[in-house]
Amino acid sequence: MNFEQYQNYLIDTASSLLSIDSASGFTTNVTDYLLKTVEELGYPAYRNNIGNVIVTVEGEDDTEPVALSAHVDTLGLMVRSITSDGMLMITSVGSPLLPSLDGEYCNIHTRDGKVYTGTILSLSPAIEQNMAVRIDEIVHSKEDVEALGIHAGDFVCYDPKTTFTKSGFLKSRFIDDKACSALELTLLKIMKDNDIKPKHK
């Protein structure tokens, strides 16, 4: 079988997954993408009550099912508080190395679905907790920020910086584990296109 013909599908799928903000606890958009993609391929899929997307692939034998898994949640940030001059103080979701994010671009997701951009900045290089987000909006106070709909508890997702090099390398944050998710979707496409039924369910 010529697997190289699926290289573009794999790259496009990985690019799509990596472009969707999905910090742990904020995964609805990426699981919506998974459900849509899997259903377009013709496989039954559903999202269970804790947000996992479950896909069933019938096999020649159903007595000894096997499972593949991958995760699409990522490290991220959350608004901890808003300063009097309109900066967002942040806390980590997962365990990102906050000082390494100094100067990185990010998206701030409000509860009503708006997305604002910003830049993560270090207010004091010696103190990790003094990381903040400067919003790309004209704000001068906490009240200005709240008027945008931004509040403590909103998710802040930083740029994955995804790049595919000409020599075939993928460089990105969150390769763990969105690359495996892209591979699993590509396997589903290969099986569907070539009418392959696995030995086990």
Image (tube, rainbow, N blue to C red):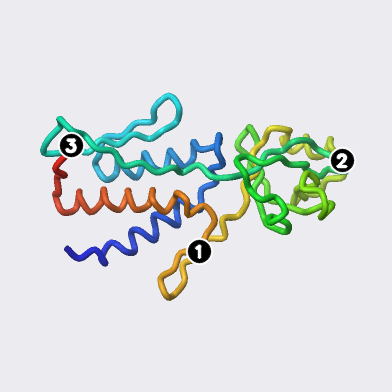
The vertical placement of 27 against 184, above or below, is above
First-in-chain label (2 vs 3): 3
> Which residue in the protein does label 2 denote?
141
Q: Amino acid at mark 2?
A: Ser
For image coordinates 44% across by 75% down, the residue present is: 166
On-image quarter of the N terminus:
bottom left
Q: Amino acid at mark 3?
A: Glu
First-in-chain label (1 vs 3): 3
124 vs 56, nearest the viewer: 124
Q: Secondary structure at mark 1?
A: strand
> Which residue in the protein does label 1 denote?
171
Question: Exactly how many numbered labels are in the figure?
Answer: 3
| Location of residue 28 in the rendering, given as x and y in whole percent from the top left corner | 49, 36
Decide if residue 46 is on the left or right side of residue 170: left
Q: Amino acid at mark 1?
A: Lys
Q: CA distance from mark 2 to mark 3?
A: 57 Å
Q: Which mark is residue 58?
A: 3
- Crowdedness of circle 3 by 10 Å Cα count: few (<14), some, many (20+)? some
- Crowdedness of circle 1 by 10 Å Cα count: few (<14), some, many (20+)? few
First-in-chain label (2 vs 1): 2
